[in-house]
Image (cartoon, rainbow, N blue to C red):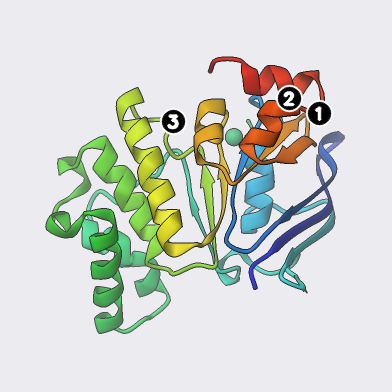
Amino acid sequence: MTDLTIRNITKRYGALTVIPQLTLKIEDGEFVVLVGPSGCGKSTLLRMLAGLEEISGGDLLMGTEVINDRPAKERDMAIVFQNYALYPHMTVAENMGFALKLRKRPRAEIDERVDKAAAILGLGKLLDRYPRALSGGQRQRVAMGRAIVRDPQVFLFDEPLSNLDAKLRVQMRAEIKALHQRLKITTVYVTHDQIEAMTMADKIVVMNEGRVEQMGTPLELYDRPANIFVAGFIGSPS
Ligand code: ADP
Ligand code: MG
């Protein structure tokens, strides 16, 4: 069971409260998109989920288990960032297998999992290449491959497409969605792009100043925005 429950989560940086008592439930297998203006706390929330940032109050649960104090590497979540720096001195296969190597998995298992992820992502012919010989979209796929090989219970994406050009972004949206349809891994996807949110989400969470303004399906938010902020955010061009 990989429902994620964010219960009264608070985040403070010194005297500054960035997230005051945020509560959110993400169901097993859902693709949830967090949207909101720059600085509203999207990355902070994702990093707290991943265990990369301490929480100042509240509880995080996976299923029924409180994971507040569980170290990042034991959370069984894979995070893909905007600046998905690949290791330049490693091939695609080595990049993808590295996390498993660190976890001392046997060679045969690493190869098998890398091959499987590469097939899913259309990287089969590129496994021996180095990152410098890849296009932006191919690098992005390798970054996703590094997450997939770990076979995580949860995927976390932090604006993974914002470094790509518009055409590639549209293509990668579809690819990430297809991947989700296939693997059904619970996904929390952060973007500040409302078109991306509308086209990708099972549910959208609209955030503003560390608060949830509304959570709902794209249609619900479009048809029945809870307030003027949501209406403005969903309705405006990116
Ligand atoms: P978003 O991802 O929605 O753009 P962030 O989660 O990155 O927003 O940031 C939310 C707020 O927290 C911002 O006001 C930002 O300046 C602040 N913030 C983020 N990280 C730190 C930090 N390490 N120290 C102090 N303030 C921070
Ligand atoms: Mg951010």
- Res. 102 in view: yes
| Rendered residue at 35%/73% (across/down) | 101
Query: Contact (CB < 8 A) between labels 2 and 1?
Result: yes
How many marks the image carries: the answer is 3
* Residue at disc 1, CB closer than 8 Å to ligand 1: no
Q: Position of residue 125 (x, y in %)?
A: 12, 56
* Residue at disc 2, CB closer than 8 Å to ligand 1: no
| Disc with the residue nearer the chain's start (2 vs 3) | 3
Seen in the image, is 26 located left or right of residue 6? Answer: left
| Disc with the residue nearer the chain's start (3 vs 1) | 3
| Residue 108: quadrant of the picture | bottom left
Q: Amino acid at mark 3?
A: Ser
| Residue 30: quadrant of the picture | bottom right
In this view, the residue in front, 156 or 168, is 168
Q: Secondary structure at mark 3?
A: loop
Q: Nearer the viewer, mark 3 or mark 1?
A: 1
Q: Position of residue 173 (x, y in %)?
A: 41, 39
In this view, the residue in front, 149 or 200, is 200
Query: Contact (CB < 8 A) between labels 3 and 1?
Result: no
Tell me the number on the disc at residue 226: 1
Q: Is 94 placed above or below 179 here?
A: below
Q: Amino acid at mark 1?
A: Ala
Q: Amino acid at mark 2?
A: Val
| Rendered residue at 59%/72% (across/down) | 74
Q: Nearer the viewer, mark 2 or mark 3?
A: 2
Q: Secondary structure at mark 2?
A: helix
Q: Secondary structure at mark 1?
A: loop
| Rendered residue at 43%/47% (across/down) | 177
Tell me the number on the disc at residue 162: 3
How far apart in space, not on screen, are marks 2 and 1 (Cα)?
Answer: 6 Å
Residue bearing the label numbered 2: 230
| Rendered residue at 28%/39% (across/down) | 137
